[in-house]
Image (cartoon, grey):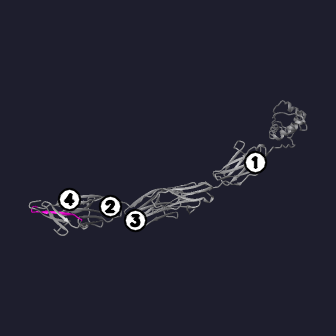
Amino acid sequence: MGIPSPIVSWFKGDKKIPQNTKKYLHSSDGDNHFLKVCKVTTQDSGVYTCRAINLVGETLCRPVFLSQLSPAAVTSGESARFTVRVSGFPKPIVQWSHNGRVVKSSSGYKLVEEEEEYTLVITRVTSEYEGEYSCTATNRFGQTTCTTYLEVKKSDISQIQPVRCSEGGEVYFNYVTAGDPLPDVKWFKGAFQIQPSRNCIMVANPDGSGLINIKSAKQEDSGLYTCKASNQFGEAACSAELVVFRESPMALFVGKQAVLQCSLTGSSPMEVVWHKDNIAVTSEGNYVIKSERNKYSLHIKSLELTDQGVYLCKASNSVGTATFTTELMVIKKPSFVRTFEPTSAAVNEPLRLECQVDEDTAVTVTWTRDGKKVHLSMDCKLSFEDKVAVLEIPKSKVKDSGKYVCTATNEAGSSSCEAVVTVQGKILQVTSGENSWWFIALYQTCKLLLNVAMLSFVLHSVFVFYADVLLCLSFCFVDGLQSPQRSQRNPTTRTLCQEPKSPSGQPSLELLLWLLNGSKRKKRL
């Protein structure tokens, strides 16, 4: 509307649309004006403007952003692009700025304009290009601005995952990097750079992925591993812990069932293979392979000695490989490699039985005598160390005679060895000599006190069954009562009593009576 009535024209972008063609139809009902676009195609996209002019003036509008800028995060070395669409009449002037400074076309920036679409291209992003970017559209009726932020990421690298494995296991640390140019990658353990070796292999692929592989991990390989990626535009790093632990072998007995199990995490599809001593194991015969969710297990139905060895579970997918290693030790029943022989001993002499087995893992040893179990006591010492079993009696007695059996047992079975032991009474032998007079004196005393019939019984009892007691008493007697000949040769000997002397040095009747009735005792120095 307007006085006089305005002339209305339609524009697509900066181009005026002709009236009443097959493509465009203009119409009006007075104050309202219409533009009909026939058979619309993608080429009809754009900004349409209606312009009304009379003698007084024309209707115009300030610029308007039809699309806004969005924040962007770009890795150092890559390119960045910001695009807006602006409408306004007359056509606005568009200007770009970075952190308040006007951006002009240069080697670092490229300005592109296509009808109502305006684009700022940063050909190679570095940390200098990070910050706030603004686009301002201006015509004589006003201006409008939109802003955004560009984040420049350093050389990007994926996080490596911590690893725990037993000694001898295989370790993989996998990474993926991004950047232009592709960053160089270095590995560190603690503060020291790792160099490739026969046991430590490093792989760097053209697509930016790579890995470090420790073929056989040792406990001293434990520590913090860091992967550093860098190029001229920046640096990125990630770290993970490696723990290598000593694992005792799994020890099971012949005939038992074994279950070896490991837990794995990773993306599918995943291939899992079991190995024994570097030879692949399949689910057949004595072996059964099972999997449930992320748990994979190898079952051995009935263990044999040939099943002993090092078992490895190896899992692989498109990203990398992981392994789990364990050692299986199969224990057979104990066998005797050295036994004890039949033996004899005298009363009060030490008795020792000793034997040796070839296996002592979880082995218990028992001793029996004539079928009755022998227990550890003050009179009987039992021990089992370094595969050697020992039964020791410090002072043997006649009752210790019998058949001794040693039995070694574990969960795989048992073995025994046996022998007969004989303990005999000790017979005292008396020899003639300068100190033998005390034996004759004792004999003559017994003869005075007992008749001949009783003498045989006493001699048998005293000298056979209690020989050691008599020896002890008689030696004490000899120490306290020196013979006349000994006293004469060594006048300085201390005596507890002064006995009557016999010219021949042999005990007399007077001596025996003196022994029986006692005498007045005194000490002589």
User: What residue sits right under mark 3 in the picture?
Assistant: 182
Sequence-first disc among 4 and 2: 2
Residue 228, visible in the rendered structure: yes
Q: Distance between the residues labelled 4 and 1?
A: 117 Å
Tell me the SS state at disc 1.
strand
In the rendered view, tell whether residue 404 sits above or below residue 517: below
Is 48 in the magenta? yes
**Cβ atoms under marks 2 and 3 closer than 8 Å:** no
Q: For the C terminus, which image quadrant?
A: top right
Q: For the N terminus, which image quadrant?
A: bottom left
Q: In this view, does 500 lie to the left or right of 135?
A: right
Q: Nearer the viewer, mark 1 or mark 2?
A: 1
User: Which residue is nearer to you in this view: 169 or 231?
Assistant: 169
User: What residue sits right under mark 2 in the picture?
Assistant: 128
Q: Which of marks 2 and 3 is in front?
A: 3
User: What residue sits right under mark 1 in the picture?
Assistant: 403
**Cβ atoms under marks 1 and 2 closer than 8 Å:** no
The residue sitting at 32% across, 66% down in the picture is 123
Within-10-Å neighbours for mark 4: few <14, some 14–19, many 20+? some
User: What residue sits right under mark 4 in the picture?
Assistant: 143
Q: Residue 223 carries which label?
A: none
**Cβ atoms under marks 4 and 1 closer than 8 Å:** no
Q: Where is residue 156 in the image (x, y as percent from the top left)?
A: 39, 60
Sequence-first disc among 4 and 3: 4
Within-10-Å neighbours for mark 1: few <14, some 14–19, many 20+? some
Type of amino acid at the residue the image marks with label 2: Glu
Type of amino acid at the residue the image marks with label 1: Lys
Q: Where is residue 393 in the image (x, y as percent from the top left)?
A: 73, 45
The boundaries of the magenta stretch are 45-56
Q: Distance between the residues labelled 2 and 3?
A: 19 Å
Tell me the SS state at disc 4.
strand
